């Protein structure tokens, strides 16, 4: 069975080994209550779809550290992704 999951944002590799996660404005309200708890240094679990995946149906779960949050833009460290579609982001507990 194949499921079609719409991305809620995009991950872009930035300079100095950090990555920027842009959450689309349509989903900012949905994630608003969760994102309110995001603080510098928080550990996040990020579910993303690699744009160069061989079959196009696999997702990755990555552990990342939050560096900054400005509205719907998160800067994180420790994720290997560039131009990947963001599926979900949660606090690691």
Image (cartoon, rainbow, N blue to C red):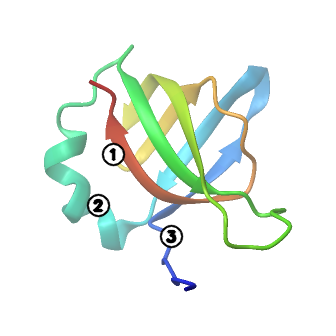
Question: Which of the numbered marks, if any, corresponds to residue 28?
Answer: 2
Is label 3 or label 2 in front? 3
- Mark 3 vs mark 1, CA separation in Å: 18 Å
Q: Residue at x 61, y 58 (%)?
A: 59
Q: Position of residue 75 (x, y in %)?
A: 52, 32
Residue 82 in the figure: left or right of residue 64:
right
Q: Position of residue 47 (x, y in %)?
A: 50, 50
Looking at the rendered image, the quarter that the C terminus falls into is top left
Residue 77 in the figure: left or right of residue 25:
right
Please, is residue 9 above or below residue 45 in the view? below
Q: Is 14 in front, or is 8?
A: 8
Circle 1: is it few (<14), some (14-19), or many (20+) Cα within 10 Å? few
Q: Residue at x 44, y 24 (%)?
A: 66
**Disc 3 vs disc 1: Cβ atoms closer than 8 Å?**
no
Question: Which of the numbered marks, if any, corresponds to residue 71?
Answer: 1
Residue pointed to by mark 3: 7
**Disc 1 vs disc 2: Cβ atoms closer than 8 Å?**
yes
Please, is residue 18 above or below residue 22 in the view? above
């Amino acid at each position: 069975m194949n499921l079609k999951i719409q991305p809620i944002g995009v991950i872009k590799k930035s300079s100095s080994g950090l990555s920027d996660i842009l959450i689309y404005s349509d989903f900012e309200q949905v994630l608003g209550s969760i994102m309110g708890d995001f603080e510098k240094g928080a550990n996040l679990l990020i579910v993303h779809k690699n744009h160069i995946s061989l079959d196009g149906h696999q997702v990755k779960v990555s552990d990342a550290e939050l560096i900054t949050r400005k509205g719907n833009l998160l800067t994180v460290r420790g994720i290997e992704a560039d131009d990947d579609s963001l599926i979900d982001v949660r606090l690691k507990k």
